[in-house]
Amino acid sequence: MVAVTVKFYGQLQEVVNEKSRQVTLQRCDVEDLVDTLIKEHGEKLKEKLIDAETNQITDRLVMFVNGMNIKGLKGAKTELKEGDLITIFPPGGGG
């Protein structure tokens, strides 16, 4: 089991009703974290985090593990370790 801290920004704070929280995971990668968060917070959060067409973490989501963008790491398969800080920014609109 691994405990990590997750910080939520923008619309995600409204969906989960908190700015940050500690999450304990059985398995330890970003995909497992997202699955756990969706199980706890339901469809509204899933709509923000998961691309409906691919059923994968949306490319528009910005997520950092200890200040490093997961897109520059191993994406959804980025491993998480005890005490990691994960920050999640909702998909942004353009224009």
Image (cartoon, rainbow, N blue to C red):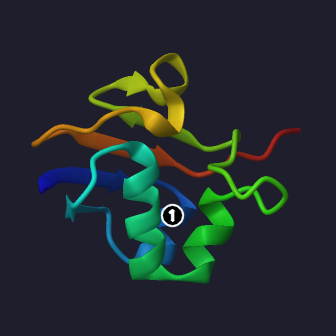
Which residue: 46% across, 50% down? Answer: 31
Q: Amino acid at mark 1?
A: Leu
Where residue 78 sits: x, y (%)?
40, 32
Where residue 53 sits: x, y (%)?
85, 58
Sort mark 1 into few (<14), some (14-19) or many (20+) by Cα contacts within 10 Å: many
* Residue that sits furthest to the right in the current view: 95
Relative depth, front residue between 68 and 34: 34
Which residue: 23% across, 40% down? Answer: 85
Relative depth, front residue between 66 and 54: 54
* Badge 1 element: helix
From this view, report whether residue 90 is shown above or below residue 15: above
Where residue 82 sits: x, y (%)?
11, 42
Which residue: 68% across, 48% down? Answer: 58
Residue corresponding to mark 1: 12
Where residue 84 sits: x, y (%)?
19, 38
From this view, report whether residue 7 is shown above or below residue 94: below
Q: On the picture, is 67 further left or further right than 89?
A: left
* Residue that sits furthest to the top in the current view: 72
